Amino acid sequence: MLPGTPSRLGAHFDGEGTNFALFSANAQKVELCFFSSDGQSETSRILLPERSGPVWHGYLPGTRPGTLYGYRVHGPYDPDRGHRFNPNKLLLDPYTREMRGKYCSYGDLLGFIKSDPKGDLSFDTCDSAPFVPNVTCDSARDSCPVQRASGAALR
């Protein structure tokens, strides 16, 4: 993994590899997770090596369009201050152009334990990856508009 550039958010293929850039002003580290071609198993995790202001980024030579990935973002779990970082939960790239798989409404997607007396202030350690659609690395199609795959950006 090379430093890459923060200039374009999302995953962008340049013909030789892919630059990954994700906004998160309060993250302490960001892991880029890759998945098998069927999306069923996580095959590797790599730390995004650079941070420029609030943008985490890295460039991975040889990573081609169609590669399935997601993020695990580490940071404070302090709901009273608006921070709910939970690296057990796979996050979609909010700047992706394509998703594969289906979203499953399942308790492991929540960052908290539904049955815990603390309610949404509790912390869930179950891995959500099996229940989250994967996103694919972007092709070199610059004419496609960037659409958000999720409603909320990371803070």
Image (tube, helix red, strand yellow):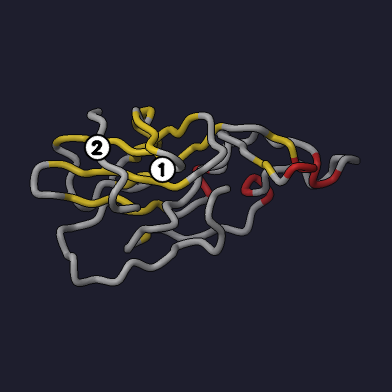
Compared to 143, does 111 lie above or below? above
- For the point 45% across and 34% down, which residue is it? 30
Kindly indicate whether the residue at mark 1 contacts the one at mark 2 (C-beta within 8 angstroms): no
Q: Quadrant of the N terminus?
A: top left
Compared to 111, does 104 lie above or below? below
Give the residue pinned by disc 1: 55
The picture quadrant where one finds residue 46 is top left
- Tell me which numbered mark, 2 or 1, is placed earlier along the sequence: 2
- For the point 34% across and 45% down, which residue is it? 21
Farthest residue to the right: give it: 117
**Image spot of residue 117 (x, y percent):** 91, 41
Give the residue pinned by disc 2: 4
Q: Distance between the Cα atoms at labels 2 and 1?
A: 11 Å
The picture quadrant where one finds residue 69 is top left
Q: Is residue 119 left or right of residue 89?
A: right
The total number of labels drawn is: 2
**Image spot of residue 108 (x, y percent):** 64, 45
**Mark 1, other Cα within 10 Å: few <14 / some 14–19 / many ≥20:** some
**Mark 2, other Cα within 10 Å: few <14 / some 14–19 / many ≥20:** some
Pick the residue in front: 132 or 24.
24
- For the point 40% across and 51% down, which residue is it? 134
**Image spot of residue 100 (x, y percent):** 36, 59
- Callout 1, which amino acid? Val
Disc 1 on helix, strand or loop? strand
Pick the residue in front: 67 or 29.
29
Farthest residue to the front: give it: 53
Pick the residue in front: 47 or 132.
47
